[in-house]
Amino acid sequence: MGNKKGLIRKLNAYTRLMRLDKPIGILLLLWPTLWGLLLAGDGRPNWPIVFIFIIGVVLMRSAGCVMNDIADRHYDGHVERTQNRPIVNGEVSVKEALFLASGLSVMAFFFVCFLNAMTIILSIIALFLAATYPLTKRFLAIPQAYLGVAFGFGIPMAFAAIQNQIPLIAWSLFISNIFWAIAYDTAYAMVDRDDDVKIGIESSALFFGKYDVFAIIVCYALMLGLFVYVGWQMAFGHTYFIGLLATSGLIAWQYQMIRARGKSDCFRAFIANNWIGLSLLISLGVGYYLP
């Protein structure tokens, strides 16, 4: 009985280490990947490839969380929001975490091997980005931009998998995701601003300072501007742009949440970005099927 309880506790710790109890990270990685798959498939998703990418998103996001907590294990204990993470409180050892991250990465690579050579090569770059992102918080003024590169890398991979090439439209979508990541992760960083100052961690919230809210709105505007460009290039009809107007309404709602810079409201704004990602996916979908 005691062994069974111990196993349940360990599995619970692994679940929290991979953030499976907090799926927002998976969703923020999934939406841009689905944008890329939809555009690369010209509005007709290749479902076996979509399935592989969804599995890959879950596995690599989980692996990235484990890698992040290994890299930040000497910092997380000093941050209110992260002080009870499994490695910090001793529920999971560093050795166990390394095995877990390696296992998840190998599983993700197994699925990628069903795709073409270009996608396999890009997957190695994606793994490098996931593994090195936690280190950028030590020296990059805006590590959120690097996060945007890592979280958006599913876009060029999607085009590589379906078209065996990465056209300009893919890079436009990719850059839009970088601006989106800076926007939502700056709101997230505003929650930890005081703790980050104490422990010497870089973040866009610190870099932008009193202009943090303004910078977030500018990043959202640049993201939407690139989506306008994508719609123009794809010759989408007016329903696509109406969808973008709906997304801008969600951004206005975000502004109302973050304008006072309250920690709980900034965190709620970060979580609410799930709806922005979904709204943009729906906009792309109606761009293909509605005038």
Image: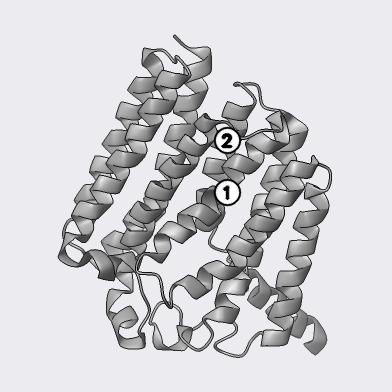
> In the displayed structure, does residue 87 sit left or right of residue 235?
right
Percent x, y of residue 212: 22, 60
User: Do we see residue 277 in this rendering?
Assistant: yes
Quarter holding the C terminus is top left
10 Å crowding of disc 2: few (<14), some (14-19), many (20+): many
Element carrying mark 2:
helix
Q: Nearer the viewer, residue 10 or 38?
A: 38
To which residue does mark 1 refer?
A: 153
- In the figure, 233 relative to 248: above or below? above
User: Do we see residue 20 in this rendering?
Assistant: no
Give the residue type at disc 2: Gly
- In the figure, 66 relative to 36: above or below? below
Q: What residue is rendered at 69% in x and 79% in y?
A: 97
Q: Nearer the viewer, residue 151 or 129?
A: 129
- In the figure, 286 relative to 19: above or below? above
Whether residues under marks 1 and 2 lie with C-beta atoms below 8 angstroms apart, the answer is: no
> In the displayed structure, does residue 164 sit left or right of residue 148?
right
Count of numbered marks: 2
| Distance of label 1 from label 2 (alpha carbons) | 10 Å
Q: What residue is rendered at 73% in x and 50% in y?
A: 121
Q: What residue is rendered at 64% in x and 51% in y?
A: 57
Ranked by sequence position, the earlier of labels 1 and 2 is 2
Give the residue type at disc 1: Phe
Q: Which quadrant of the structure image shows residue 221?
A: top left
Percent x, y of residue 240: 40, 20
To which residue does mark 2 refer?
A: 36
Residue 225: mark: none
Element carrying mark 1:
loop
